[in-house]
Image (cartoon, rainbow, N blue to C red):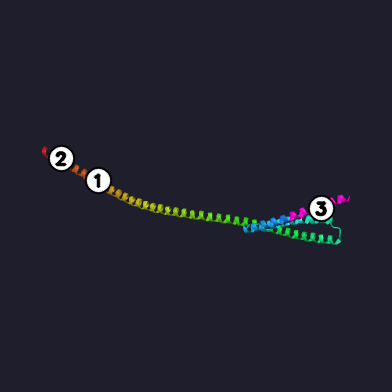
Amino acid sequence: MEMYQELLNIALEAAILVFESLGLIVVAVAGIMGAVNYVRKDAFTRLKLAKGFALGLEFKLGGEILRTVLVRQLSEIMIVGSIIILRAALTFLINWEIESEEHNYKFGEKLNGLEEQLQEIEEQVQQIETNEQELTVSINGLEKRDQAFTAQLQELEERDQVLTEQLQELEERDQELTEQLQELEERDQELTEQLHELEEQAQEIIGE
């Protein structure tokens, strides 16, 4: 029985040593990585460091819990209990800081998402303004072409009016020439009749 108790004590001491060593190693590695991340200006330095410390404290707390099995005196139990309470409080504070950092990280992600959406909206607004400017330029070009077409149409209308007036003048002259031709034909007919009369008179004179 005593041998079993000794083996149990040795196993517990070895487990405590392992947990304490792991806790120290984790805390040391977390501190080194935290310094490296700080130099690199990593945005998640505090979060990674807090998680490393919390994991190291968990190992240390596991070792203290195992240590309660070995203690026999009330004073040692009180000391171990105080250490457990202290480390539990530290673990709670670190976990609270981790939750706060994660909340800040999520809030930062949301803020970045909103900034990206705002940037996309600004780009869309710029694209719309660009399209609007292009449409304005196109409308101005169409208005200029419409003005040119209008001016050409006015010129054509004026030319058509001039040609119409010239045509009217030609028709009036044609009518005048037609009337003069009719007068000439009437005079020619009169002269022809007079010629016939003269011929008849000449025949009568010859016959006598």
Q: Is 194 in front, or is 116?
A: 116
What secondary structure is the stretch in magenta mostly built from? Answer: helix
Task: Say which element carries label 2.
Answer: helix
Residue at 48%, 54% (x, y): give it.
134
- Element type where label 1 sits in the image: helix
Q: Nearer the viewer, residue 65 or 159?
A: 65
Residue under numbered circle 3: 12
Q: Nearer the viewer, mark 2 or mark 1?
A: 1
- For the residues marked 2 and 1, what is the alpha-carbon distance in whole angstroms? 26 Å
Mark 1 is on which residue type?
A: Leu
**Helix, strand or loop status at disc 3:** helix
Circle 3/circle 1 CB separation < 8 Å: no
Residue annotated with mark 2: 199
**Residue 20 is a magenta residue:** yes
* Mark with earlier residue (3, 2): 3
- Kind of residue sitting beneath label 2: Glu
Quarter-wise, where is residue 110 in the image?
bottom right
- Highlighted range, magenta: 1-23
How far across and down, in percent of the image, does residue 37 sit? Answer: 64, 57
Q: Residue 2's x, y, as percent? A: 88, 51
Tag 1 residue: 181
Q: CA distance from mark 3 to mark 2?
A: 173 Å
Q: Earlier in the sequence, mark 3 or mark 1?
A: 3
